[in-house]
Amino acid sequence: MAGQSAQLLGPLLWRISDQQPVGSDCSSLAVYLGLQSQEGSNPNKQSRTAAQIIVHPEYSAATDDNDIALIKLSSAVTFNNYISPVCLAAADSTFYSGVNSWVTGWGNIGSGAPLPSPQNLMEVEIPVVGNRQCKCSGYAPTTITDNMICAGLLQGGKDSCQGDSGGPMVSKQAGRWIQSGIVSFGIGCANPNFPGVYARVSQYESWIKTQITTNQPGFITYTSTGTNSDLSVSCSGVSDGLHHNMPLKVSSLVLNTILLADDG
């Protein structure tokens, strides 16, 4: 987590220990749950291997579009106070600019600055940045697609960073944590006008359900309150979303994961 006053997060939903090249044997991919520190004792840790990896068929390494994959674990996971599932944002979810979000990971705490010992899990609270605002800040308009969601501070200072990729971005509503995004990419870490970019989980409800025919994950609709200020944002290459009769052309993201336990 780059440049923020990060705090420890208690329960860990999941962690991929090592990156696995797409198309290689996934049986050696270790998956740890309940891990809080990468050093020392982790009494609540559970270990599994990956039985199957399903990469989104339209994933593009060139554009980071559709930056999502599913992992089936080798055996079921025992949920407890330290390991619990997270709800996934349903297709009709709305995340307006300013929605409070939390990202967790063991990544760098700044550009080129590794997480120091004992490498405890970190978290950062950042607001959603609407896609129009994200396009009008520093990214080229065609870079940010509707399969992505941005979050961070336009003045910089808080962000996910290298090593956090694949981690969850969540928001809380009615007592439930709902995963809105998956850490995908950015320009540096916590740089002004370059909020972090995440795979937008709500875009993939239909695809996930076609891949998981039994014991499907729980999808919850996140509904933002107030008005969507992002509709009034415009800049070169991005027109505002007000007073138009035609549908808006909202844009269409390295391998990230949502862990799904075998119902075994």
Image (tube, grey):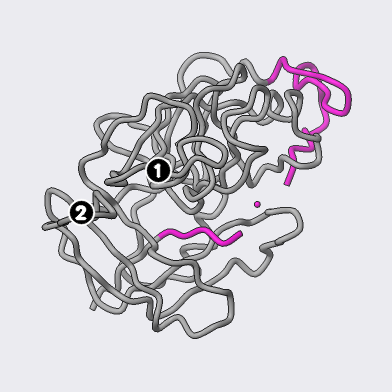
Q: Does the magenta stretch include residue 257?
A: yes
| Picture quarter with the C terminus | bottom left
Q: Residue furthest right?
A: 236
* 192 relative position to 225: left or right: right
Q: Residue at x 26, y 73 (%)?
A: 263
> Mark 2 — residue?
83
Query: Residue 32, percent across and down?
Result: 29, 64
Of marks 1 and 2, which one's residue comes earlier in the chain?
2
Classify mark 2: helix, strand or loop. loop
Query: Residue 259, percent across and down?
Result: 38, 62
Whole-angstrom CA distance, mark 1 to mark 2, is: 23 Å
Amino acid type indicated by mark 2: Ile
Q: Residue at x 40, y 48 (%)?
A: 88
Between label 1 and label 2, give the one nearer the viewer.
Answer: 1
The secondary structure making up most of the magenta span is loop
- Front residue of this view, candidates 73 and 209: 73
Amino acid type indicated by mark 1: Leu
- Front residue of this view, candidates 45 and 37: 37
Q: Residue at x 31, y 46 (%)?
A: 119
Q: Residue 115, labelled with which disc? A: 1
How many marks overall?
Answer: 2
Query: Which residue range is magenta in the image?
Result: 231-258
Query: Residue 190, percent across and down?
Result: 57, 29
- Front residue of this view, candidates 88 and 43: 43
* 107 relative position to 230: left or right: left
> Around disc 1, counting alpha carbons within 10 Å, would you say few (fewer than 14), some (14 to 19), or many (20 or more)?
some
Q: Is residue 82 above or below residue 207?
A: above
* 192 relative position to 179: left or right: right
